[in-house]
Image (cartoon, rainbow, N blue to C red):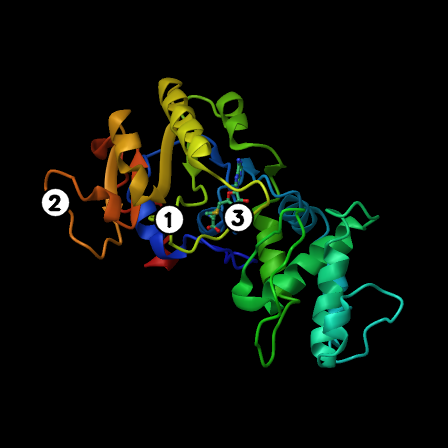
Amino acid sequence: MTKPVLKWAGGKRQLLDEIYARFPESYDRYHEPMFGGGALFFDLEPGDGTINDTNPRLVNFYEKVRDSPEELIEQCRSFEHPENEPDPSREFSDSDRKAKDVEQYYYQQRALFNRRPYGDEYDELEEAALLLYLNRTCYNGLYRENRSGGFNVPIGRYSNPDWVRADEVRSASEAVQNTEILNRDFEYIIDRAEEGDLVYLDPPYEPMSATEYFTSYSKEGFGRKDQERMVEVAKELDENGVYVILSNSGVTYNMYDEVGFRVEVEGATRSINSDGTNRGEVNEIIATNVPPDDCQKAGQRGLAGF
Ligand SMILES: C[S@@+](CC[C@H](N)C(=O)[O-])C[C@H]1O[C@@H](n2cnc3c(N)ncnc32)[C@H](O)[C@@H]1O
């Protein structure tokens, strides 16, 4: 059981027990095509299988965690003194020059992290370390990009942020040693998952209403069409004999109900009419094709989890 290294919006630590309750008694390989912070993967430590995300900088980060954990930790340690003067030869915005040193340092780090989307030369190991640094020092640990793909979250308020996280990096590195890490659209899973494998899908949630705040993880976003593609993917996986568990926002209830998935509402704070007419108001669903009789009795958690 490992903790996620990154804070990630939509992280699933709160929902782990409910997800485990849908796990089949046994399965072959485990795949997580929309990985983010990978809360379920790290808790489960499945070993063999694939993890994937469309965010290239996130994927680079996990590759470095897997292949060069000590170098990554060293690079993070080199950021040890944010109160130091930033390097005047490097780019950061004029408005931030007026702010305190620690802020200048943060915005300089952010500018360095944004070299890739703006077409500048960058070093993959440094980029990975910068992602961890920003994740632990930015506002609320959010990850948000502007239309050009630039990470644009402002500095957060922490009295003593820790971005080295050596123990977490080492444990996460162990957990992904035999895992294939991919940077594709989630549809790759149709070709990769085989009969008897288990796939957990956790997309960016569709907003419950037009006014609800929604975190955009990337410049591409994830719209209604992507949600519809995901239903098709889930259906095809089901036809191929692959176990599928997915979490999503309540507005997608009917989409999975209609293709024969078992859909249940989780964390609902508002009541639902028995005829389902108010389903659009519920918070979150878990949908699965694993029949109730095939589910594990006590979930997959090791004894330490109880
Ligand atoms: C809700 S988050 C996953 C959170 C994760 N379960 C956790 O515990 O942290 C959704 C992830 O899907 C990724 N994503 C968005 N569009 C995608 C796509 N078309 N294919 C694969 N991943 C995508 C985002 O970059 C984001 O990291």
* Image location of residue 82, percent across then percent down: 73, 76
Q: Is residue 127 visible in the rendered structure shown here?
A: yes
* Image location of residue 166, percent across then percent down: 64, 64
Which of disc 2 and disc 3 is earlier in sequence?
3
Q: Is residue 196 above or below residue 19?
A: above
Q: Is mark 3 within 8 Å of ligand 1?
A: yes
- Mark 1 residue type: Ala
Q: How far apart, in angstroms, are the residues tagged by discs 3 and 1?
A: 24 Å
Q: Dot 3: what SS?
A: loop
Which residue has dot 2 on it? 273
Q: Dot 1: what SS?
A: loop
Q: In this view, does 80 lie above or below 152?
A: below
Which residue has dot 3 on it? 36
Q: How crowded is mark 1: few (under 14 residues within 10 Å), some or many (20 or more)?
A: few
* Image location of residue 209, percent across then percent down: 34, 49
Q: To which quarter of the image does residue 292 belong?
A: top left
- Mark 2 residue type: Asn
The label on residue 274 is: none
- Mark 3 residue type: Gly
Residue placed most toward the observer, 197 or 205: 205
- The structure residue drawn at horizontal position 63% and vertical position 47%, both measured from the top left corner, is 147
> Which numbered disc, 1 or 2, marks the residue closer to the eye?
1
Q: To which quarter of the image does residue 232 belong?
A: top left
- The structure residue drawn at horizontal position 57% and vertical position 54%, both measured from the top left corner, is 144
The reply to whether the C-beta atoms of the residues labelled 3 and 1 are less than 8 Å apart is: no
The label on residue 210 is: 1
> Which numbered disc, 3 or 1, marks the residue closer to the eye?
1
